[in-house]
Amino acid sequence: MGRGKIVIRRIDNSTSRQVTFSKRRNGLLKKAKELAILCDAEVGLMIFSSTGKLYDFASTRSDDGTSMKSVIERYNKSKEEHHQLLNPTSEVKFWQREAASLRQQLQNLQENHRQLMGEELSGLSVKDLQNLENQLEMSLRGVRMKKDQILTDKIEELNRKGNLIHQENMELYKKVNLIHQENMELHEKVYGSSRDVSGANRNSLLPNDFSIGDDSHVPVHLQLSQPQQENYDTPARATKLGESTFYVKVTQQ
């Protein structure tokens, strides 16, 4: 069963009233602290017990109590400005003060910028110059760290891309070798079979006692020579023919 609804009224029993005060005070302080941390709010809380004891909380506490004082001053200033805004004349004066404050802040920022650039250092003491030097060294250290980080990231990215390109090149190299091997096998099949067929046809056309080697590029020389004189039984027949007989000698080199 859930808790029953509590009637909000003064607790008559002093002991129960003190216990309830302690519990709810701690809860209220806890909620104020959580609100300041979670929402980055400036919170000030003051609680006086029935005996007059003070319990307070400020979002930025200090031992001398200046945190609570600054919260109260801010509250009073905000309340005063709120009342002043209701009057047109007071509103004009308020915005004039705000403009003057902004101009002063801009002037201070410009002066700090010139000092960081090494200008207008004549009015600074040795301590101020030392603080300025430390600030510049810290800024330079941060810039160098950021630059090194960017360069490291770029190097890692280039190495990663280089590895990917190397793997792609290896894959392409394997494919080229495979295609080259297939072309060599096809070349051997085509030209090997045609060489065997042409060689067999050429040898079949030659006489039985004459053959040409496989080297088809060996030149063949034709030469005419007259026959040697021989003794024939029928010289009249040769005279009757009245023709000259020549022999063709085929030589192979």
Image (spheres, helix red, strand yellow):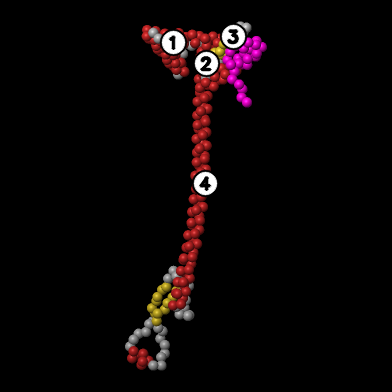
Q: Which badge, 2 or 1, is on the more N-terminal residue?
A: 2
Q: As displayed, is residue 44 above or below residue 152? A: above
Q: Residues within 10 Å of mark 2 (few under 14, many from 20)?
A: some
Q: Give the quadrant of the N terminus.
A: top right
Residue 232 as seen in the image, left or right of residue 75: left
The residue to which callout 3 is attached is 48
Q: Give me the disc on residue 42.
A: 2
**Do callouts 3 and 2 mark residues in contact (Cβ within 8 Å)?**
no
| Element class at badge 4 | helix
| Element class at badge 2 | loop
The residue to which callout 4 is attached is 167
Q: Which badge, 3 or 1, is on the more N-terminal residue?
A: 3
Q: Residue at x 50, y 31 (%)?
A: 150
Counting from the top left corner in percent of width and height, residue 223 is at 39, 76
Q: Amino acid at mark 4?
A: Gln
Number of numbered discs overlaid on the protein picture: 4
The residue to which callout 1 is attached is 82
Residue 22 as seen in the image, left or right of residue 76: right
Magenta segment: 1-26
Q: Which badge, 2 or 4, is on the more N-terminal residue?
A: 2
Counting from the top left corner in percent of width and height, residue 15 is at 66, 12
Q: Residues within 10 Å of mark 1 (few under 14, many from 20)?
A: few
